[in-house]
Amino acid sequence: MHGVLRRHCLPVLVAAVLALGVGVMPAYADEPSKEEPAATVTTSAPAQGEKAVGEKAVDVSVPAEGDKDSRAVTAPADAGDAAAPEKDPAPAGDAGAVPSAAPAEAPESGEADAKAADVPSDAPADDAAAAAKSAEAPKSGWVREDGAWRYYEAGAAHKGWLTWQGHQYYLDAETGAMRTGWLDRRYLYASGALAQGSWVASEGGRLYLDDAGDPGNGWVADGSGRAYVKDGKPQSGLMEMDGTLYYLDASGHLSGACRVMVDGRCYSVSAEGVATEVTEQLVREDGHWVYYRKDGTILQEEYLKFYSGTVSVPDGATKEQAAVVRATNTTPSPGEGYCAAWVTWVFLNAGIGNYTGDACDMYWRWCKSDDPADLQPGMIVAVPTEPLSYAAIIYGHIGIYVGNGLVMQSVSGKVRYQSLPGWIRTFGTTSTVKWGWLGGKALA
């Protein structure tokens, strides 16, 4: 039944459509084979969605009904008339876009166009007048020209002193060129910046320039400590200020703890650089005793080192002290093992008094200090025991300090003198060396 209706109704419908003038392709018109492309744009078309090498692929497929494809291109009636669309235009306002108005005469390859270089990159590409106006803008800021730096303000080169980013520069008064090196008594670094609050080298040595760039005066502080300068030059040696004596090293800085000789006198310098003249001083350095004399000579520890001869009376000695020192030169030894008896005879010969006992007794009675600051000429120096002999272990050993870092004594039946550090090193190995006034009678 359905087949009969189809055979009779279909021709009627077709005739009706034709009568209305609608150009519908007959259902049985020759159609292209599905195996062949509907339209050909290039001789070798890439697959859909791919790009042909060297050209832009064109999508010529007809979208399905109801689809919307802004990139779809209607296939031309004749495949041979197909043409690719124009390239997308450059983005509006793209700084990298080439201006549409090129210079009248483009420079050759490798050359720079001076005016074009001065045109701001954001100048309107299509406004040649605006570009030319920008090219004629006045110079501003630092400009390198004729082998020198200059600083421009509203097109005019600055001259004289200029403060820029916290530093000072000097621009020549005639040419405006930036200066370097010495300018009168000021110094300009290679960068042109003024040297301020720093040391600089000069033909006469190092100079300190203050915060204004001028040669400094007085105390200055740097990474090495405190230094004293006059007219920029570092001072050295002893310098008295406000009643305090300081010692400055060759660089002008406070030297720190040391001992120095100046004009034949010895000075002890503290860590703060304060100097004190040394008269006689026994100190312990690096685990050893050292004696500094007023004349700057130093007595080191000398183990079992004894000397024959006489000693001189030290400067500043009192009458009683001088008498004891002279008596040590004239009083002979009573024999081996009689060091304390020799001390008794010395004080008798000096007219001081008669004080008896062995070295151990005198040590415990009258030797009260081991402070070098208390030691004075004429004092006895003793230990209650020492290991060099059997008798010394029991009775100890004693001598007389005669000043200048020396001790006189009777040892091995002879009168010998020895450096105080050496005496301590020799006899003070098992007990503490101490000193004091024999009989408790102070001679100074």
Image (cartoon, grey):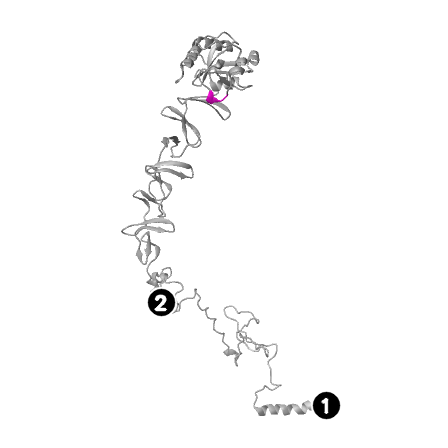
Nearer to us: label 1 or label 2: 2
Instruction: Find residue 217 and report its horizontal and vertical position in percent.
Output: 34, 38
**What is the number of callouts on the image?**
2
Location of residue 394 by image quarter: top right
Disc 1 to disc 2, C-alpha distance: 85 Å
Label 1 SS: loop
User: Can residue 309 be seen?
Assistant: no
The residue closer to the viewer here, 80 or 83, is 83
Kind of residue at disc 2: Ala
Q: Mark 1 points at which residue?
A: 1
Furthest-right residue in this view: 1
Question: Which residue is at a point 69% across and 91% down the rendered structure image?
Answer: 5
Assess disc 2: are there few (<14), some (14-19) or many (≥20) residues with their C-alpha within 10 Å of its C-alpha: few
Instruction: Find residue 51 and report its horizontal and vertical position in percent.
Output: 53, 69
- Residue 128 against residue 210 in the figure, above or below: below
Instruction: Specify the segment rendered in magenta.
Output: 370-374
State which tag comes first along the sequence, 1 or 2. 1
In the image, 367: left or right of 124? right
Instruction: Find residue 440 and report its horizontal and vertical position in percent.
Output: 49, 15
In the image, 323: left or right of 425? left
Furthest-left residue in this view: 174
- 353 in the magenta segment: no
Instruction: Find residue 195 and report its horizontal and vertical position in percent.
Output: 36, 44
Assess disc 1: are there few (<14), some (14-19) or many (≥20) residues with their C-alpha within 10 Å of its C-alpha: few
In the image, 374: left or right of 217? right
Kind of residue at disc 1: Met
| Numbered badge on residue 130 | 2
Label 2 SS: helix
